[in-house]
Amino acid sequence: MRYFVGACKVQAGTIYKPSHSESEKFMGLRGPLADEQIKWGITLYMHTTAYPSVTDFMSWLEGMKDHLPDWLVAGAYLTGKPLLIKMGDDLETLRAAYFWSAETESQIESLEARLETALA
């Protein structure tokens, strides 16, 4: 929730005060999504709205959750570091490979291990 409030402050220039029920709804996201995915979702959401709110974000996220990258790639994107972002992009590309091979799987495992180490 702090990340959302901080992002709202940057985006709208005001301090957003979520209600108690909004905070509870927001905390309910932690089950199906990793923190990195939620933070990446918040980052994307802030680029689409001028007046952020938890209720609107929850609705937006419901439609986008199948399109968010996994926690590892989202974490790489959140660092803002070009090398890690590229590694995240490469991992997403390899996972979507049309022709799956042992080499592709090896590259995926290598990138996953490197990203996990870099993000630890």
Image: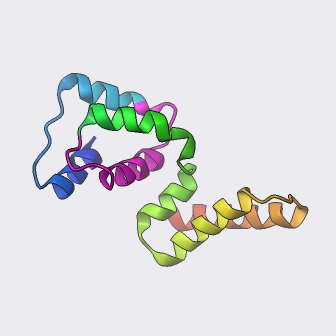
Q: Position of residue 52 (x, y in %)?
A: 23, 43
Residue 43 counted in the magenta span: yes
Q: Please identify the residue farthest to the left as the structure is shown.
A: 14
Q: Is residue 54 above or below residue 103?
A: above
Q: Quadrant of the N terminus?
A: top left
Task: Give percent across and percent down for residue 117.
Answer: 58, 65
Residue appearing at x 42%, y 38% in the figure: 61
Q: Residue furthest bottom?
A: 83
Horizontal relation, residue 15 to residue 69: left or right: left
Q: Residue furthest top?
A: 21
Q: Is residue 113 left or right of residue 38?
A: right
Q: Is residue 61 above or below residue 79?
A: above
Residue name at image x 72 percent, y 56 percent: 96
Q: Quadrant location of residue 99?
A: bottom right
Q: How many marks?
A: 0
Q: Residue at x 20, y 45 (%)?
A: 51
The answer to whether 104 appears left or right of 116 in the picture is right
Q: Residue at x 27, y 46 (%)?
A: 4
Residue extending furthest toward the right? 102
Q: Is residue 54 visible?
A: yes
Is residue 120 among what the camera can see?
A: no
Image location (x, y in percent) of residue 64: 48, 41
Q: Nearer the viewer, residue 31 or 95?
A: 95
**Magenta span covers which residues?**
29-52
Query: Colour mode?
Result: rainbow
Horizontal side of residue 71 vs 25, given as left or right: right
Vertical placement of 53 versus 70: above or below? above
Magenta residue check for 10? no
